[in-house]
Amino acid sequence: MGPRPMTERIVSLYSAEDIAARVRELGAEITRDYAGRNLVIVCVLKGSFVFAADLARAIDLPLRVDFLGVRSYGEGTESSGVVQITQDLSRPIEHEDVLLVEDIVDTGLTIAHLMDLLRTRSPASVKVCALLHKPARARVHVHVDYLGFTIEDHFVIGYGLDFAERYRNLPYIGVVERT
Ligand code: IMP
């Protein structure tokens, strides 16, 4: 008999219910902080599409939603710091309050780059809302204004997050274990 093929097992880290409860809290906090302002939710594609959709519905304010497509080149699961914009915002953000919505802040390089980019367009403010933060892997300091959960150094999938483009549709966040 040859070697046993590698299989992947997914262990749940945050259930759909855990995530929904935290998203409701973040939405309430953002609703309080941005009352009376011109809020633009910027969803960073692709990973944030699920989180941004839920977060937008947890915010009880008039707002608009726009999308930024980014690709960070790197080997496998490692971010290289080279951030390529694959899709730009559809409108200017001058004098508006921008909330960048990210799935996960890992090395911080993507968010740092996007903050610099957006600030060149004279918004009234730019803040960050991230569902997950992996501080163990930080390479640049980024301040996350609204944070869902801080996690250990695991590669996580689900709720928009992928591994080689798979698993984005899982309703929960899990860790892939190789067995
Ligand atoms: P950063 O530039 O290293 O902060 O990485 C940001 C991007 O890398 C995220 O928006 C994700 O798309 C991806 N990423 C980082 N860690 C993970 C992970 O554990 N699972 C899935 N994608 C990840």
Image (cartoon, rainbow, N blue to C red):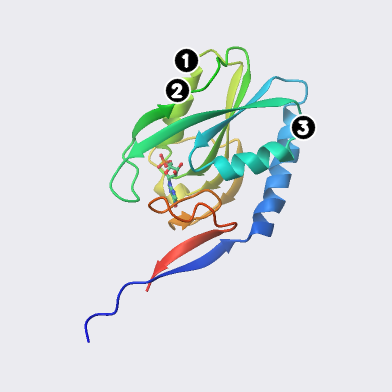
- Residue most toward the bottom? 1
Circles 1 and 2 in contact, beta carbons < 8 Å: yes
Question: Circle 2 is placed at which residue position?
Answer: 116
Question: Circle 3 is placed at which residue position?
Answer: 32
- Residue most toward the left? 2
Q: Residues within 10 Å of mark 3 (few under 14, many from 20)?
A: few
Examine the rendered structure and indicate whether residue 66 appears above or below residue 151.
Answer: above
The percent position of residue 110, horizontal first and vertical second, equals: 42, 35
How much space separates mark 1 and mark 3, taking CA atoms? Answer: 27 Å
Q: Residues within 10 Å of mark 2 (few under 14, many from 20)?
A: few
In the picture, which quadrant includes the C terminus? bottom left
Residue in the image at 40% along x and 28% along y? 85
The percent position of residue 141, horizontal first and vertical second, equals: 45, 36
Residue in the image at 69% along x and 19% along y? 38
**For marks 1 and 3 on the same chain, the one whose residue lies earlier in the sequence:** 3
Question: Circle 1 is placed at which residue position?
Answer: 120
**For marks 2 and 3 on the same chain, the one whose residue lies earlier in the sequence:** 3
| Label number found at residue 44 | none
- Label 2 near ligand 1 (CB < 8 Å): no
Examine the rendered structure and indicate whether residue 24 appears above or below residue 65.
Answer: below
Displayed quadrant of residue 25: top right
Examine the rendered structure and indicate whether residue 133 appears above or below residue 66.
Answer: below
Residue 42 in the figure: left or right of residue 26? left
The percent position of residue 55, horizontal first and vertical second, equals: 66, 40
How much space separates mark 2 and mark 3, taking CA atoms? Answer: 26 Å
Q: Number of numbered discs present?
A: 3
Residue 43 in the figure: left or right of residue 28? left
Secondary structure of residue under mark 1: loop
The percent position of residue 16, horizontal first and vertical second, equals: 65, 58
Secondary structure of residue under mark 2: helix
